[in-house]
Image (cartoon, helix red, strand yellow):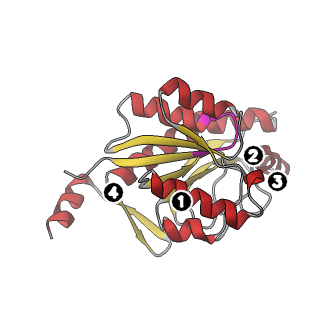
Amino acid sequence: MSAVKRIAVLVSGGGTNLQALIDAQEQGDIISGRIAAVIASKPGVYALERAKQAGIPSYVVARKDYPDSRAMTVALVDKLKGLNIDLVVLAGFMTIFTEEMVNAYPNAILNVHPALIPSFCGKGYYGLHVHEKVLEYGVKLSGATVHFVSEECDGGPIVLQKAVAVEEGDTPEALQRRIMEQAEWVILPKAVSLFCQGRLKVEGRTVRILKPLQLSKECLQ
């Protein structure tokens, strides 16, 4: 039986995706994994209160405390390594880090993006801006994507996606809420659980999801 994976969730704001992960963990939906730490990019955010209420140790690695992004990234990696973290989850983490993070955790950083990548993603596409652009363009479907993080912004291999219909009269706020409820809070915990079970296999740009039986056979080889 493999050891339980230690998960760190990185946050910058209210922590709604963090709460979805906490709820999934409490319901037993995250198999072979446990949230061991919540790390915020600034003090005082409500996500830290969510961690406290759930009894999860929390830390702050603030960008303003370091001269540049590289110094902050190195400090963040040191913190993660010191906590023996196996999986890093970006849940609304709004600080850009440098390549040291991806080098330290190759195919072990998951991010949730509020659109169907490769549409409406990349530089400048974050938060409410994504949903504003979706509505401006007039697409009929949006949704959410969980992907591995690479050095390219929103460019890592896709793990899971879920579509959500754009409805007549949607505002960016209404669409954002519906995508969170119907997609982000569903696929993020699922992707985390699949990683912790060792059921994600990256082959180039493709992520294969192994069945438990396949996993057992491959482990025996």
Closer to the chain start, of discs 2 and 1, is: 1
Work out how far the residue at label 1 is from the one at label 3, CA to CA, in angstroms. Answer: 42 Å
Q: Bounds of the magenta span?
A: 10-16
Q: Where is residue 47 in the image (x, y as percent from the top left)?
A: 63, 33
Q: Position of residue 64 (x, y in %)?
A: 78, 52
> Would you say 62 lies left or right of 82 here?
right
Look at mark 1 in the image and give the residue it sits on.
78
* Residue farthest along the bottom direction in this orientation: 204
**Would you say residue 45 sits in the magenta stretch?**
no
* Residue 61 shows in the view: yes
Residue at x 39% of width, y 46% of height: 193
> Would you say 68 lies left or right of 53 here?
right
Q: Between tags 2 and 1, which lies in front?
A: 1
Viewer-nearest residue: 120 or 77: 77
Question: Are the residues tagged 1 and 3 within 8 Å (C-beta)?
Answer: no
Q: Between tags 4 and 3, which lies in front?
A: 4
Q: Is mark 2 on a helix, strand or loop?
A: loop
Look at mark 3 in the image and give the residue it sits on.
137
Q: Is mark 1 on a helix, strand or loop?
A: helix
Residue at x 74% of width, y 52% of height: 65
How would you rate the neighbour count of disc 1 (Cα within 10 Å): few for under 14, some for 14-19, many for 20 or more? Answer: some
Look at mark 4 in the image and give the residue it sits on.
199
* Residue 160 shows in the view: no
Closer to the chain start, of discs 4 and 3, is: 3
Look at mark 2 in the image and give the residue it sits on.
127
Q: Position of residue 34 (x, y in %)?
A: 39, 41
How would you rate the neighbour count of disc 2 (Cα within 10 Å): few for under 14, some for 14-19, many for 20 or more? Answer: some
Closer to the chain start, of discs 1 and 3, is: 1
Q: What element carries label 4?
A: loop
